[in-house]
Image (cartoon, grey):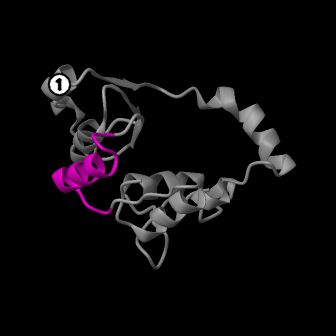
Amino acid sequence: MLGRREARLKVARDFGATDIVKARDEAAVGEVREMTHGGVDAVLECVGLKSSMDTAIGVARPGAVGFVGVPQGSEELNLGRMFRSNIALRGGIAPVRAYIPELMEDVLLGSLDPSGVLCLTIGLDGVPEGYVRRDGRETRRQGDGQGPVAR
């Protein structure tokens, strides 16, 4: 897991992350490549900045980098590194509605607990304000400046 925000790192540990790298950019690439003796087999970049995607590509062995959402600045990806290292980029629109019935059943049965990544419950009346807050990047936990707000 690469990250620096303690709240997110706690969630990662809770979900089973065993190795945490707090460095950024080239320092992170170097640390991960050293830890893994050349890079990792699977990378997932989750809606970061261009530097996050560059780091994901930098730590990958030949194979694929998966991404969720479109990172800012993605139009300037290091295609040369990807080509020379045989790294493919895989991502796209997630058909989340297709997963809702199965996942909702798991949540209701108690076999899946999503609370680790959620921190605030809003009612249906609060959804419009939630979108406004998200657009203004105000969707952070109160007090620590980290993490999503809307549940």
Question: Outermost residue toward the bottom?
Answer: 143
Give the residue displayed 40% in from the left and 34% down from the top: 41
How far from the left and from the top, in percent, is residue 39? 31, 40
Residue nearer the viewer, 91 or 57? 57
Q: Which residues are magenta?
A: 22-39
Asked whether, in this view, residue 75 is left or right of residue 44, the answer is left
In the image, residue 98 sits, relative to residue 3, either above or below, namely: above
Which of the 4 image quadrants contains residue 84? top left
Which of 96/111 is in front? 111
105 drawn magenta = no
Residue 107: x and y, percent?
78, 47
Q: Amino acid at mark 1?
A: Leu
Q: Is residue 146 above or below residue 137?
A: below
Where on the picture, by quarter, is residue 54?
A: top left
In the drawing, does residue 59 fall left or right of residue 125? left
Residue 7 percent coordinates (x, y): 47, 68
Label 1 residue SS = helix
At horizontal 23% and vertical 57% (from top left) the residue drawn is 24
Classify residue 51 as left or right of residue 137.
Answer: left
Taking the view exactly as shown, the residue that stands out farthest to the right is: 109
Count of numbered labels shown in the rendering? 1
Per the image, the residue denoted by label 1 is 79
